[in-house]
Each structure stands twice: as structure tokens, then as C-alpha cells.
Image (tube, coloured by chain):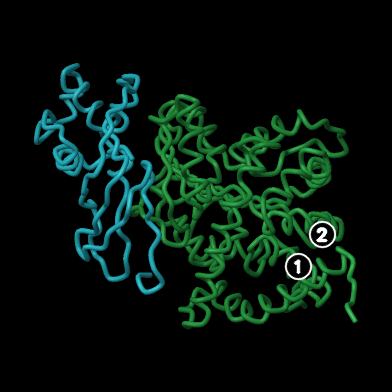
Chain colours: A green, B cyan
């Protein structure tokens, strides 16, 4: 006799199954990713699988996101407890960029402002375009997704910025640049995709020129107290579900990033929890998904995108519990 | 991919000591007109590897750029325009970038280089 499951039950089972498999294999990666040791072959294969998943997720989803939200694929920065309409979100996304630059004290003086910029995990180039325009200089963006790189290029050309921004398909863990190339190293909500955090931070530092600023805006889990070795099982369970849908490896905390930057002798290290400033974002994304346009676009997009959409309430739950943090970590490479 | 971008790309395959510059194999070059911005060019001159730019521009079919350049030449409009053309207006739409040490080929499609490394190259 056929067992008829509701859509919700089907979805929950799928996400649970996927999450269990990911969790088992990612354990080794967590140790390695924070300790920076060489990973074994099985872990390497899983990392390759993750990268392919990330590329495919964005190949599939970028179009629908752009259609509804535009070219910035990151959270907006809002005044706490404000009420916003959909049209204000773009302004909030621009404000996020400006607040991050301010937090890192990036100079605006014509002599000291950045002259070369790398956008690590550039999406469809929203930040790259903004930064290139703001500083009047060239910016290059890297992404794992060929669809995104091509779209980024087309968008930049349409804005007359083809001469200032360029895009490559490349891996943030193995950036195709010589050492010390960039005055500003920008990672806006891409860090959460990086499976080996130590390698990720190392590459950011490697391609930074002496005196350059490094800005990381990313999703972290709460800092562990001195008596804790890890998050509690319920917390891990919630994060695993999100990891599966968004092609995220195991999460780390803001403190973990700070320690990595310290270990590389980077200076002026600053970190903050901006969770309260992004609170309106996920409810707004959910609302946009539930519009007629949102639903029809999702149906047409693909399973990866739909899964991503269905997990959005879990992001809200994570923030509400104080488990998920929207973090900014910045520093300066010594001269 | 314009040559300003080519000038910042290198092959970081495991074991490679000098992966710059990448050799260019041309399939399709497109010349695109770009606004001439002397200040931008002067800033860029200090940051680029000039020799690599000269070689690359020759392969792309442009032979006007002098073999050597000094910062003082940036005052010459004639030089600046040639520098501008080579750096900003020659685009490799289709082709390949080749690692100078290993010969590994990185494709360029629709102007976008794919620099992803395989598992055994990192």
C-alpha cells in the first residue's frame, strides 16, 4: 500500500537524509579546516563535491535572485526595529557595503585609497561594480560559477564598467594571483562556503598587498564559551539542515576567524556581530519568495533553488536563537 | 579578458615556482573602445609587469608598444595611448592561457578565464 506523504514530510525527510551524510564526512574537514593540516583523499573528494554543488547551486539560482532582488547577493544593513518596504532593501544592501568599508577604515583619500581590488566570491558582480565605481579603480571578481562570471561580465558591460571590472572562474582557496596584488581584499558573504577556513584566510592574506585591508562579512555560529568544546547537538542539527540546502561546509565562529587572522600576524583586527542590523532581511526574502512572481520563478528554477528557499525559515530560527551570527571581521596587512 | 587582467593572473599549481606570466593562445580577439583615462593609466603603470604586457600584446596582434618603458614616458600622450590600447582595448574572447612551467591549459570562454585547479594540482 502506498504511503502518501505530505510535501512538508517529503521535504523534511529529504533534508534530514542529506544533512546526515554531509555531517559524517565533514567532521574530518572541520578539524583540518581550522588546523590547516593537509586533508586526506576522501575529504578532498568531498571538498570537490562541495565546490561543484556550490557552482551548480549558483548556476541555477542566480537568475531568479537577480530578477527579484537585483545584483547584490548579500544582506542589507538596517536600523534595528525599522520597518522597510521591498524598494528600501537595495539601499540597505548598498549601505552594508559602505558600513563594512567604514568599519575597516578603508581610506578615501585619493593618495591612500585602494588602487586594486579583489572581490572573493563575487556573485554577479554587485560589489565589484560598486567598489570599482566608488574608488575609480579596477576590481576583479572570482566565482566558482561560470554562469555567474558570464552574467557579471555582461552586467558590468551594460553599466559601462567593462574597463574597470573583470571576472574569472576561480577558487577562493587557490586564487590565481601572485602574492601581494590587491589593496583591498573583499569577501562579502562568501566565507560561509569555504571548506578550509585556514586556507581561505591564508589566501586572502597572501594576495593582499602590504598595507592592504581585508574585509570578511560572513555567517558564523555563536562563539563557544571557555567550557565548551562544540555547539550542542540541537544547534548542530539546525545548522546541518541549512548546510545541506546552501552547500555550506561546517560552520565556525567569529572567534575562530579572529584567531586565524592573529596567527598570520595581521594587524588592526576588528570583529563585530551585526545580527541585529540584518534582522529584517530573511523575512523580506521569504515574503518575496511567496509572491506570485517568486513562486512561479522557483517552480521554473530547479530543485536546488527550491530547497534553498524552503530552508529560509531555519535561518530566521538560527538568528532568533542567537546561534547564527552575521559577522564582520576586518584587518590590515602590515606594510 | 583584457590584458590588464592577464597581467594579474598566475598559475599556482602545486610545485610551480613561477607561474607568471601565462602564455596566451589566441582563438578570437576583439578590440573594444574604452574611454581614455590618463590618471587611471598612470596608477596602473606602477602596478603592472610591463614586459609581460608587451609580449601579450604582440601575441594579440598589436606590435606598437615599445619594448621598454620608463615612468617618464607616461608624460607622452603618444605612449599613453599605446599603453591604453594594449592594456584596456584588446580582449581575448576565446583562447587559452598556458602555465609557463607545466603547460597546463586554462580555457578562456566568452572573455572569462577559468582558473579552477584539479584536485591533484593543489
Whether tag 1 and tag 2 are in contact, CB under 8 A, the answer is yes
How far across and down, in percent of the image, does residue B94 sit? Answer: 30, 44
Hey, which residue is sitting farthest left in the picture?
B67
Q: For the residue labelled by badge 1, is the local secondary structure a helix, a strand or a loop?
A: helix
Picture coordinates of residue B42, whole percent (x, y): 28, 27
**Circle 2 SS class:** helix
Parent chain of label 1: A
Q: Is residue A4 left or right of residue A51?
A: right
Tell me, yes or no, if residue A213 can be seen here.
Answer: no
- Give the residue at mark 2: A314
Residue B17 in view in this figure: yes
The label shown at residue B19 is none
Asked which quadrant contains residue A227, the reply is bottom right
The residue carrying mark 1 is A241
Q: The disc numbered 2 marks a residue on which chain?
A: A
Comparing A43 with A146, the one in front is A146
Q: Is residue A81 left or right of residue A118?
A: right
| Relative to A44, residue A163 above or below | above
Specify few, some or many for label 1: CA neighbours under 10 Å numbering under 14, 14-19, or 20 or more: many
Question: Horizontal and vertical percent for residue A209?
Answer: 39, 47
Identified at 70% across, 62% down, the residue is A245
Amino acid at each position: 500500500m502506498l504511503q502518501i506523504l505530505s510535501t512538508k514530510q517529503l521535504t523534511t525527510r529529504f533534508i534530514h537524509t542529506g544533512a546526515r551524510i554531509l555531517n559524517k564526512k565533514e567532521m574530518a574537514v572541520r578539524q583540518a579546516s581550522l588546523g590547516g593540516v593537509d586533508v586526506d583523499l576522501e575529504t578532498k573528494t568531498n571538498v570537490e563535491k562541495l565546490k561543484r554543488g556550490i557552482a551548480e547551486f549558483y548556476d541555477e539560482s542566480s537568475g531568479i535572485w537577480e530578477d527579484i532582488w537585483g545584483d547584490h547577493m548579500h544582506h542589507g544593513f538596517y536600523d534595528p526595529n525599522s520597518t522597510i518596504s521591498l524598494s528600501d532593501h537595495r539601499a540597505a544592501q548598498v549601505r552594508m557595503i559602505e558600513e563594512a568599508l567604514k568599519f575597516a577604515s578603508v581610506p578615501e583619500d585619493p593618495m591612500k585609497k585602494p588602487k586594486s581590488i579583489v572581490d572573493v566570491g563575487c556573485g554577479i558582480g554587485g560589489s565589484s561594480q560598486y567598489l570599482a565605481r566608488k574608488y575609480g579603480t579596477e576590481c576583479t571578481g572570482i566565482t566558482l560559477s561560470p554562469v555567474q562570471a558570464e552574467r557579471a561580465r555582461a552586467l558590468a558591460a551594460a553599466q559601462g564598467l567593462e574597463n574597470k571590472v573583470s571576472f574569472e572562474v576561480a577558487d577562493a582557496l587557490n586564487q590565481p594571483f601572485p602574492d601581494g596584488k590587491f589593496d583591498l581584499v573583499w569577501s562579502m558573504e562568501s566565507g560561509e562556503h569555504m571548506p578550509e577556513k585556514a586556507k581561505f584566510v591564508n589566501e586572502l592574506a597572501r594576495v593582499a598587498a602590504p598595507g592592504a585591508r581585508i574585509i570578511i562579512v560572513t555567517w558564523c555560529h555563536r562563539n563557544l564559551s571557555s567550557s565548551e568544546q562544540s555547539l550542542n547537538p540541537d544547534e548542530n542539527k539546525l545548522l546541518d539542515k541549512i548546510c545541506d540546502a546552501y552547500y555550506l561546509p561546517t560552520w565556525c565562529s567569529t572567534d575562530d576567524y579572529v584567531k586565524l587572522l592573529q596567527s598570520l600576524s595581521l594587524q588592526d583586527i576588528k570583529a563585530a556581530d551585526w545580527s541585529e542590523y540584518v534582522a529584517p532581511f530573511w523575512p523580506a526574502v521569504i515574503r518575496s519568495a511567496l509572491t506570485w512572481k517568486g513562486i512561479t520563478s522557483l517552480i521554473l528554477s530547479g530543485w536546488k533553488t527550491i530547497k534553498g528557499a524552503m530552508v529560509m525559515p531555519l535561518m530566521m530560527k538560527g538568528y532568533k536563537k542567537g546561534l547564527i551570527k552575521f559577522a564582520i571581521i576586518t584587518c590590515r596587512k602590515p606594510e | 579578458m583584457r590584458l590588464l587582467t592577464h597581467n594579474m593572473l598566475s598559475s599556482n599549481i602545486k610545485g610551480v615556482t613561477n607561474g607568471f606570466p601565462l602564455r596566451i593562445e589566441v582563438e578570437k580577439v576583439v578590440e573594444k573602445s574604452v574611454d581614455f583615462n590618463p590618471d587611471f593609466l598612470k596608477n596602473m603603470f606602477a602596478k603592472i609587469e610591463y614586459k609581460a604586457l608587451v609580449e601579450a600584446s604582440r601575441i594579440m596582434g598589436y606590435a606598437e608598444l615599445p619594448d621598454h618603458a620608463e615612468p617618464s614616458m607616461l608624460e607622452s600622450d603618444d605612449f599613453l595611448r599605446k599603453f591604453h590600447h594594449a592594456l584596456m582595448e584588446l580582449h581575448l574572447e576565446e583562447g587559452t592561457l598556458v602555465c609557463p612551467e607545466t603547460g597546463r591549459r586554462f580555457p578562456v570562454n566568452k572573455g572569462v578565464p577559468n582558473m579552477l585547479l584539479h584536485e591533484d594540482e593543489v
